[in-house]
Image (tube, rainbow, N blue to C red):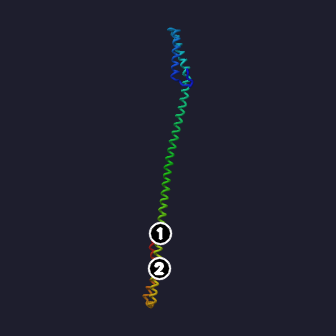
Amino acid sequence: MGNTSGTLSNADLTDTAVHLKHLQKQEQEKSAGNTEFDKDLVKKYKDEITKINEPKIAEMETIKKMYDALVVKYGQDKIVIDRLTQLFQELQTKNDALKNDVNNYYSITNTSARKVYYEENEIDNLNTYHSVLLVTYYLLFAIYLIRFFYNKYYTSIITWIYLILYIITPWLLRRIVGYFYEM
């Protein structure tokens, strides 16, 4: 049998079948109807076939064991891949949640920064208005004082009352507004 690779090919099977037919023909010629001879012939054929097939069966068992080991390894690898996929999805979900938290934090921080900026601008505007009003107030007061002394209003009590009210008005307004803000 011409095959040395360890597998049974069609040529090997054909050679074996031809060889067995040849042996059978020889035995038939020798025995010509002997039943004991037929039993021996069957035993010889079985032995011959077993001799031919034993290495092939052993090789097939080795291949089967190898494939069984590969199937087990594949099952283990599949479990590992499934677990890694699950862990990846969990980490991806956590990552997305963290990104969302960071974005929300920066959004709130940016909103707070804008709010502070606008409030500071408003305070600056209020301080400017306060300064302008204060200057205007004291300018009017200086004009009144010039008139007060020029026209000699300092002799009238009503004029003095107006003058005192005019002087304490900024102080009174600040206290009144402060009281309402504290409520």
Considering the image in quadrants, where does the N terminus appear?
top right
Residue at 48% across / 71% down in the picture? Answer: 124
Amino acid type, mark 1: Asn
Residue 104 % position (x, y): 48, 57
Q: Is residue 44 above or below residue 72?
A: above
Q: Quadrant of residue 5?
A: top right
Instruction: Give the secondary structure at mark 2.
Output: helix
Residue 63 % position (x, y): 54, 29
Residues at marks 2 and 1 touching, judged by CB atoms closer than 8 Å:
no
Q: Is residue 91 above or below residue 38?
A: below
Residue 119 % position (x, y): 47, 68
Q: Nearer the viewer, residue 5 or 86?
A: 5
Residue 19 % position (x, y): 53, 16
Amino acid type, mark 2: Val
The circle on residue 121 is: 1
The circle on residue 46 is: none
Considering the image in quadrants, where does the C terminus appear?
bottom left
Badge 1, how many Cα within 10 Å: few under 14, some, many 20+?
A: few
Residue at 46% across / 77% down in the picture? Answer: 132
Q: Is residue 46 above or below residue 148?
A: above
Q: Earlier in the sequence, mark 2 or mark 1?
A: 1
The circle on residue 135 is: 2
Q: Nearer the viewer, residue 161 or 84?
A: 84
Q: Nearer the viewer, residue 7 or 63?
A: 7
Separation of marks 2 and 1 at Cα, in angstroms: 21 Å
Q: Is residue 42 above or below residue 58?
A: above
Q: How many marks?
A: 2
Instruction: Give the secondary structure at mark 1.
Output: helix
Badge 2, how many Cα within 10 Å: few under 14, some, many 20+?
A: few
